[in-house]
Image (tube, rainbow, N blue to C red):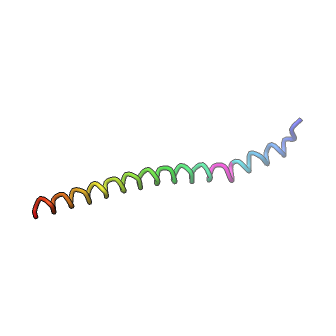
Amino acid sequence: MIDISALSGLIDMIENVGFPVIVALFLLIRYEIRMERLEKHSKDLSDTINKLRRDLS
């Protein structure tokens, strides 16, 4: 049978370690997605500027 204090310790460990890890992973994934979008838009802008320069020449 599982001791109540051991179970309580396990729950405390999950609260103290698990939750911050999950939040950090969630934020890193969101950050990565935003960086990929920013990279794509930056490339699109660069391509558009280069096209406009060629058209003006």
Q: Quadrant of the N terminus?
A: top right
Q: Is residue 39 magenta?
A: no
- Position of 23 with respect to 15 (left or right) is left
Q: Which residues are magenta?
A: 15-20
Going 31% across and 57% down the picture, which residue do you hit? 43
Report which quarter residue 42 is drawn in. Answer: bottom left
Q: Please give the name of the residue rendered at 68% of the width and 53% of the height, measured from the top-left corner.
A: 17
Location of residue 20 in the rendering, given as x and y in whole percent from the top left corner: 62, 53
Q: Residue at x 44, y 50 (%)?
A: 33
How far across and how far down the image is residue 14, in percent?
70, 48
Task: Say which residue appears at 79% left-offset and 45% top-offset.
Answer: 8
Q: Which of 42/57 is in front? A: 57
Q: Is residue 57 left or right of residue 43?
A: left
Q: Position of residue 19 (x, y in %)?
A: 63, 49
Q: Residue furthest right?
A: 1
Q: Position of residue 29 (x, y in %)?
A: 50, 50
